[in-house]
Amino acid sequence: MNYQLALETIVQEIEGKEQRLLLHSCCGPCSSYVLEYLSGYFDITILYYNPNIAPMEEYLRRLEEQRALLNKMGLGRQVDLIECPYNPSEFYEAVKGDEALPEKGRRCYKCYQLRMERVAKVAVEKAYDYFTTTLSISPHKNAQWINEIGEALSQKYHIHYLYADFKKKNGYKRSLELSSQYGLYRQDYCGCIFSNAATNKFKK
């Protein structure tokens, strides 16, 4: 599936309608372009649920950057923020047995699934029209996996999933520009201790 085309089709169909979107965000920089793009079509609430991020200081720094971005961006409409409690044990339980696998493998798939399932559940509980995630903005993330998970959760919880590959059409490039414009901290690893170790090994 062309996920960018699917996204464009959906936003054209709902344009002018009042639609509420629950958007999972992994960090401020990744959400910047996504918010710029989608705020013209949806009333957006960000769900910040990232138990994979470690250490806690890093988690809090990324959360603060998310808050700062929302204060700095002039989107024309308010974007709300739901901050989930930081509970890294949820991540470690989800990826148990796959700790030694390389980046971009099954451990990462389970991490996507963990976070996206939370957003789907909250979207149903709070009666949102759609849910999605910023994860596909990154060239290091598997957009096919992300959208397959989203589709499965849509069927499981009976809520619309917003297909997307936000890196397309210079989306990732635009996120870099916005991050620079707003002076956002851009981390050099995905978030978990395993990705941090891989990044440090590569630097050496």
Image (tube, rainbow, N blue to C red):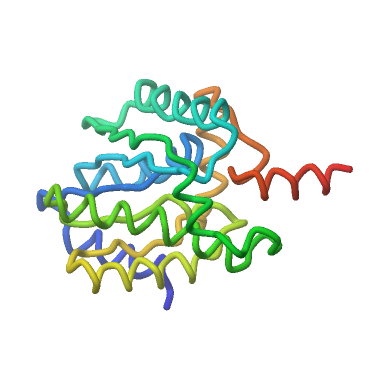
**How many numbered marks does the figure carry?**
0
Return the x and y of residue 76 as percentages of the image width and height.
Answer: 24, 30
Instruction: Give me the residue at 75% from left, 50% from top.
Output: 198
With respect to residue 164, does 196 lie above or below?
Answer: above
Q: Is residue 110 left or right of residue 8?
A: right
Residue in the image at 35% along x and 46% along y: 37
Residue 35 place in picture, x, y as percent: 36, 41
- Asked if residue 142 is positioned above or below residue 186 in the image, the reply reads below
Question: Which residue ends up furthest to the bottom in the rendered image?
Answer: 1
x and y, in percent, of residue 38 in the image: 31, 47
Outermost residue toward the right in this view = 204
Picture quarter with the N terminus: bottom left
Residue 168, compared with residue 34, is above or below; it is: below
Q: On screen, 163 above or below 195?
A: below
Q: Quadrant of the C terminus?
A: top right
- Image position of 195 (left or right of 146): right
Q: Residue at x 49, y 50 (%)?
A: 91
Q: In the rendered view, does 172 fall on the left or right side of 133?
A: right
Residue 67: percent from left, percent from top: 39, 25
Task: Tell me the residue at 30%/61% (across/down).
Answer: 162
Q: Quadrant of residue 203?
A: top right
